[in-house]
Amino acid sequence: MKFSRVIGKIDPQLIEQAEERLSKVFLELAVRYDNKHVGTGYGGDSLIFSLMYPVAHVATLNLPTAGTQGTMYFWNPKFILKQSIKGLRIVCAHEAWHAIYMHPMRRGSRNPKLWNIAVDYIVNGTVMEDFKARGHDAVAEFSKNLGRFMTLPQFCELIKNPYAKIPGFEDIVPVATDPNAPVVELPAPDEDRELTPEECQELEKREKRVKASFFYADPDLGEDMKSPERIYELLYNLLPKCPKCGALGMYQKPKKKDDKKDGQEKGKGDKGDKGKKKDKGKGKDKSDQHEHGDGEPCDCPGHEPGDQDGDGQNDQGQGNGQGDADGSCDHCGGGMDIFGLGGLVDDHMDAQESQEKMAKRISEAMEAARKLAGRIPAALEDELGKLTAPIIKWTDVIRCRLLKSRAGNAKNDWTRFRTRPLFSGLLVPRRKSYLSNFGCLLDCSGSMSKDDISFGISQLMGLDDRSEGVIVPADAEVYYDKATKIKKCNAEELTKVKVVGRGGTMFASFFDTYEKNIGKCDFLVIITDGYLLDQDVADMRQPSCDVYWIVTSGASFKAPFGRVFELHQ
């Protein structure tokens, strides 16, 4: 195997050695599934070979490991040479399964870091299932040739309390991030230029992180967790959300007992604050406190998973946003980032190939694997069928509804006649025609990130220029006084929408009061992330018009009425 392109100044001898190492892996993948007399003794895998070998492979130092965006594979030669043949084969399988399951195309507006962890559980789990099918010890093979891993239940425990000791991972020491540290981004893998000194330091830092304390894998994933969307939703609901900046997965360092005693003694000596401390103590309830690893209560709101989210919400993910901390927040800046504890096998990149083209490539690889007597997991055919099934977009459904309302619901207008039949003396009435009026409720609660809000509003451009309506922001209350009248659903008009609130979520009153405040509507559009309170959903009354729910996240939301459309699909 030869690299189709070499980016940057890389030692030719290094390139030759990396090509030779990859060639050994591809030669083994090309043989029959049950041929254990070549290379590692695992046997071939014609499915992975048919998917990876014909695609262009690029050598680059712009990333510390390997990666793919669908159309080609990128490799760091140093990373290739650091792996054993078995370890490199696991990496190849890891890359191929990301492409096979179309993980880059399925991310949507989800948090990239959390999505990377969710898909790694799926991919590494598939690699382990292949080890089991070949009669090998999946745990031993993965750990020996790539590194130790943390199962999904263990990672859930780590999320709940990163300062507690997880059995088998007692050596993990959470380290606070430096909010003032400069952020250095590496150039794109296909950008052909030399790295700056700062970028070289960043590359070395990331290469060290490749030898992470653990990877994300689980040989015994339950059937209900065989989907990255389900894993993402599980982890998202457990992670803390900063109530100020919306950062996901940032933890404040727990207070030590000695520090608490010093603070109490200092408070006793300050007579001026004595009355204030008494008042503060009386108003605080034990249920508002939570503990970190040392058993001491912490008063940082929004950093307790589950039902303590800082805003008095329930356990359905009603924290602030999905954004990442940039160090500017005085609440979570400098806290511990849980995403930095583990490591990924490869660099996850944005897809540059359509889902349809990728599905075609996978189907061709599966057909080639069958001819070569390869093994194709039964779950893969079901998964591919789901991913390539035709999807009805909400704009397609709404278009039919618009045509119906504009045609006056089949009512005739006898004040005007069609012109063509007039020449023969026929009076044929025209159909009544109207502008389509809609009402839109925009979820502005804390769990909606800025990307979710902008992505949801942009979907209204699917309505044409003959549609006008009112967009009403809402969180724990409906802000009719902040509503925006839209004459045309174009970018210029939609940028006028006001985002207010950023609190909780209570929408039931909207369906009772919208007609009084914004008038009758042909249909209603609800833009939300789907994290609604059960009681709020139960209190909703179905209006007299059609309702369309536009869900911006991967939440498993069930609407009490109307039709639900998930944007991430």
Image: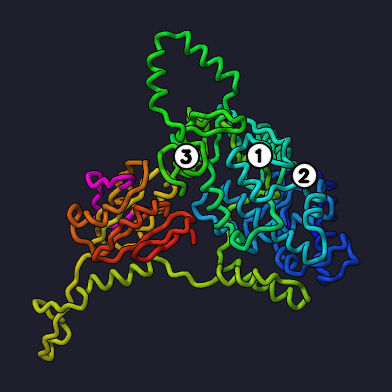
Identify the residue under disc 1: 341
Question: Which one is nearer the viewer's eye here, 377 or 363?
Answer: 377
The quadrant in which residue 92 appears is bottom right
Magenta extent: 474-490
Q: Does dot 3 land on a helix, a strand or a loop?
A: loop
Q: Three-letter amino acid code at disc 3?
A: Gln
Q: Three-letter amino acid code at disc 2?
A: Ile
* 352 w.r.t. 477: above or below: below
Identify the residue under disc 2: 10
Mark with earlier residue (2, 1): 2
Question: Which one is nearer the viewer's eye here, 478 or 62?
Answer: 478
Residue 101 in the image: state x and y as whole percent. Answer: 62, 63
* 470 w.r.t. 28: above or below: above
Q: Is residue 386 left or right of residue 207?
A: left
- The verdict on residue 294 being magenta is no
Mark with earlier residue (3, 1): 3
Mark in the foreground, 2 or 3: 3
Q: Which mark is residue 308?
A: 3
Residue 549 in the image: state x and y as whole percent. Answer: 37, 60
User: Which quadrant, please, contains the N terminus?
Assistant: bottom right
Question: Which one is nearer the viewer's eye here, 10 or 509?
Answer: 509
